[in-house]
Amino acid sequence: MDPAETRLITVDRDAPQASAIDEAARALRRGELVAFATETVYGLGADALDPDAVARIFAAKGRPATNPLIVHAADVDGARACVSAWPDDAQTLAEAFWPGPLTLVLPASANIPPIVTAGRSTVGIRIPRPEVARALIRAAGRPIAAPSANRSNGVSPTLAEHVRKDLDGRIAMILDSGPAEVGLESTVLDLSGVTPVVLRPGQVSSAEIAAILGRPVFESTVHAPASGPYGLASPGQLAVHYAPRTPADWVERLDEGVARAEQEAGVGLLVIGRTVERGSGTILSLETPEQAARELYATLHAWDELGLSRIVIVPPPDLPEWRAIRDRLRRATGPR
Ligand code: TXA
Ligand code: MG
């Protein structure tokens, strides 16, 4: 099935119209793909219990079958139905952070089809925060598998328009409830081993997780494919991921970044965590971690439309509050 027309339906984020939710839920139950906003980025949803529906996600995104999907639930009972173990740590973190931008990797229950987990024994689950997302999952009456709603390896969408640009004609429906408020993908935390491991940094930091759990948390932020019998801990750890189409360079020093923007034609300068005098539309600084998270992807999407020859990115300082942003910038500027 390759839907020729993608329907765009506007819906209120906090008080979603029942008619829109019903229509989207019916599409999901028919095995179709529906994009919707979570607090992090727009997700591309399918019925997580229907392998054919999930296969359409991989086809629409051009996603390798080796990269597992996050399953979204409306409440803790729904999340627990997707896993075969619910350790105390999971309960503690669910109470502290759900609904919210934290994905927990736990042993998968037998009802989760292998295509969702890419054949692994674990599944990533989370409860998204916006009412529109949870209303949709409730109305569908089943867990919803949803990667970010972009073509594989591209920049995640924070607006319905980003989804339309990328996936128009490939999915059934987009629910437009405005911008995703966090703007960066969820923290992925592996709870399936002895020690909790952050596989992807996000707004929920490893320090916060460690404080809530009362024990250390490892960070596994690999930037190059590790070889070995088990491959990568998380396929999202590939060096190039989340990259704009325009070539992007990581330039450590602000004065060097400014010089390159002044000397070379068609260069956009994006300065993170520092202020820069704004000389034109393509010199931009994102100053706080919250602002940078919210606006980074929208900026990369917009700048991809400008036909720039290059984007020069001056990264923020190497401090804990910037970890998730630096992780995404490394990937956006990685080798291709
Ligand atoms: O904020 C988010 O997490 C968004 C919204 C839509 O929820 N979703 C998202 O999905 O970013 P995606 O597919 O773009 O990224 C999911 C990440 C990938 O790096 C994937 O490899 C990892 O989570 N992941 C999923 N299941 C996993 C598992 N069982 N074990 C290890 N990593 C897993
Ligand atoms: Mg993604």
Image (spheres, rainbow, N blue to C red):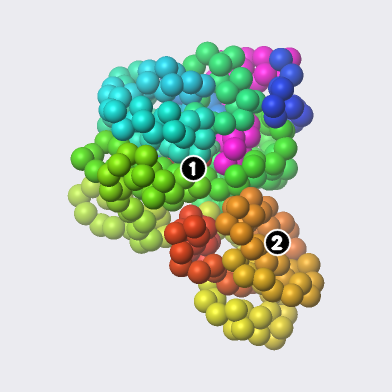
Q: Nearer the viewer, residue 13 or 173?
A: 13
The location of residue 187, given as percent across then percent down, is: 45, 44
The location of residue 35, given as percent across then percent down, is: 62, 32
Range of the magenta residues? Answer: 19-43
Camera sees residue 66: no
- Up/down of 271 relative to 131, above or below: below
The residue sitting at 56% across, 52% down in the picture is 154
Q: Nearer the viewer, residue 267 or 124?
A: 124
Disc 2 C-beta below 8 A from ligand 2: no
Camera sees residue 278: yes
Q: Where does label 1 land, which residue? A: 186
> Along the horizontal axis of the image, is 191 left or right of 324?
left
Disc 1 residue type? Ser
Disc 1 C-beta below 8 A from ligand 1: yes
In which quarter of the view is residue 257 placed?
bottom right
Q: Residue furthest right?
A: 280
Disc 2 residue type? Trp
Residue 303, which numbered label? 2
- Viewer-nearest of discs 1 and 2: 1
Secondary structure under tag 1 reads loop
The residue sitting at 65% across, 41% down in the picture is 180
The location of residue 314, given as percent across then percent down, is: 58, 72
Question: Is residue 120 one of those drawn in magenta?
Answer: no
Q: Residues within 10 Å of mark 2 (few under 14, many from 20)?
A: some
